[in-house]
Amino acid sequence: MTCGPDARLGVRRKSPSSGPQESGKSREVYFELYPVGDSMKVSAIDSATGIEVSIVGPANLPQSELERVALNKLNYVMAQKADENQQTAPKSGKNGKGWVV
């Protein structure tokens, strides 16, 4: 798939080598590239959670660079959501009575 003014809408599947993963399980990330004028919109979607992020960059950048930036943003957003889930989880004591401090 090529980037640039002649590029078309495309979806590509990739298994990233870095980023948050469940213990020993690999994950797939789908990349969608869509040209918008002289720019390229790249969406990265985690197949396991359905979390999606988008970036916009120059269309003349290599596709791998655009995907790398989108993957970094996806990893950041997933880490933020994991932190939110840990902080909002109730910490109750025995039988739901009291709080563990």
Image (cartoon, rainbow, N blue to C red):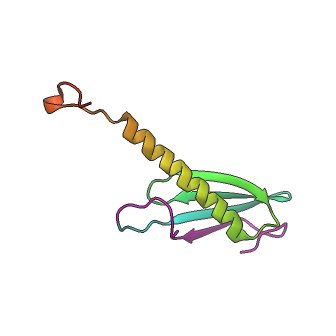
Q: Quadrant of residue 98?
A: top left
Q: Nearer the viewer, residue 45 or 100?
A: 100
Percent position (x, y) of residue 18?
51, 66
Q: State the image coordinates of residue 11 (x, y, percent, origin top left).
A: 63, 67
Q: Is residue 40 magenta?
A: no
Q: Is residue 96 above or below residue 33?
A: above
Most foreground residue, 72 or 47: 72
Q: Residue furthest front?
A: 101
- Does 40 sit above or below residue 51? below
How many callouts does the rendering have?
A: 0
Residue 19: within the magenta?
yes
In x, y percent, where is residue 5? Answer: 85, 66
- Quarter of the rendering containing residue 34: bottom right
* Residue 88 appears left or right of 5: left
Query: Is 39 in front, or is 18?
Result: 18
Magenta extent: 1-23
* Left or right of 80 in this view: 101: left
Work out which residue is located at the far left of the displayed protein and give it.
95
Q: Residue at x 83, y 70 (%)?
A: 6
Q: Is residue 55 above or below residue 8?
A: above
Q: Main secondary structure of the magenta part?
A: loop
Residue 83 occupies which quadrant of the picture?
A: top left
Q: Is 11 above or below relative to 90?
A: below
Percent across and percent down for residue 79 are 48, 49
Quick one: quadrant of the C terminus? Answer: top left
Query: In the displayed structure, does residue 78 sit left or right of residue 97?
Result: right
Residue drawn at x 71%, y 69% as measured from the top left: 63
